[in-house]
Image (cartoon, rainbow, N blue to C red):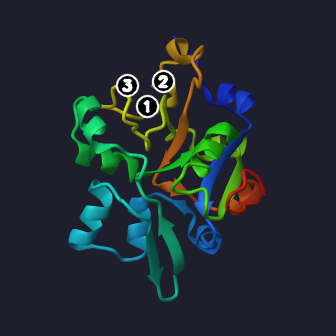
Amino acid sequence: MTPSLSTHVIEQRWPRLYHLTEIGSWPSIERHGLLSTAALLDVYGVVGAERERLLSQRRPEMRRLERSGVGTAWLRDNKPMNETVLRRTLVGMDAREYYRALNQRVFFFLDESPLSRLRNAPPYRDRAHEVLVLDTAALLSRYGHIVELSPYNSGAVHPGAKVERGPRPFLPINEYPWEERRGKRPPIAELTVPGGVQDVSSLLIERKTLQPGTGGS
């Protein structure tokens, strides 16, 4: 049976993908790619207990990475993650496994509105950010075979959350429950690429700067 969700459906319905990043990160992204936390730690030589902590525990604050000859990159914090609720709603995995799953991939919103809500949340609204807008069809032509989707915002667990997470928080396109989700809002919350996205410049439609305290550029 042919899956009802395909790369063609995604690129037709959502022709652009949105990624929120910190001001100053672009030189590293242009050089090394848009990388997962785990891949960034490889590039910046973070090993041992510190690496394990960054991959498998909640980060209450952002982490700046620097290395001579490499430049600067930022690891986003996990402030929107209520760990009490996370532990209560996890199925088939524990919190450490869930954080490791998050940190193995790069995340994109399929619409700009959830990105705006994240950017305007209290922990982030007073900082400048940059939005990378990528061409969906071009990205899927390279990475569609490994792309995985989430029906919810995987990096935000709020006090009232009830949705169960795990044991597979992310699903390949051909396994995503499209018939069940297509009438929901949103039908797909996140598109993720395990490992990262190389040669981002060739996929880039636009870079937009969001100034502190504003919703726009």
Within 10 angstroms of label 1, few (less than 14), some, or many (20 or more) residues?
some
Q: Position of residue 3 (x, y in %)?
A: 54, 17
Task: Name the amino acid, label 2.
Answer: Tyr
Q: Position of residue 60 (x, y in %)?
A: 36, 59
Residue 40 location, quadrant: bottom left
**Which residue has dot 1 on it?**
171
Residue 113 location, quadrant: top right
Within 10 angstroms of label 3, few (less than 14), some, or many (20 or more) residues?
few
Label 3, secondary structure: give it: loop
Q: Are marks 2 and 1 in contact (CB under 8 Å)?
A: yes
Foreground residue among 179 and 53 = 53
Q: CA distance from mark 1 to mark 3?
A: 16 Å
Query: In the rendered structure, which disc, 2 or 1, sits on the residue that comes first in sequence?
Result: 1
Q: Nearer the viewer, mark 2 or mark 3?
A: 3
Give the residue at x 57% y 17%.
Answer: 184
**Which residue has dot 2 on it?**
176
Task: Name the amino acid, label 3.
Answer: Val
Label 1, secondary structure: give it: strand
Tell me the quadrant of the picture where the C terminus can be found: bottom right
Task: Name the amino acid, label 1.
Answer: Leu
Q: Position of residue 169 (x, y in %)?
A: 37, 34
Query: In the rendered structure, which disc, 2 or 3, sits on the residue that comes first in sequence?
Result: 3
Query: In the rendered structure, which disc, 1 or 3, sits on the residue that comes first in sequence?
Result: 3
Label 2, secondary structure: give it: loop
Q: Note whether 106 is above or below 64 in the view shown.
A: above
**Which residue has dot 3 on it?**
163
Foreground residue among 118 and 159 = 159
Residue 195 location, quadrant: bottom left
Q: CA distance from mark 2 to mark 3?
A: 17 Å
Specify the label residue 71 is tagged with. Answer: none
Q: Position of residue 110 (x, y in %)?
A: 64, 37
Left or right of residue 170, residue 131 in this image: right
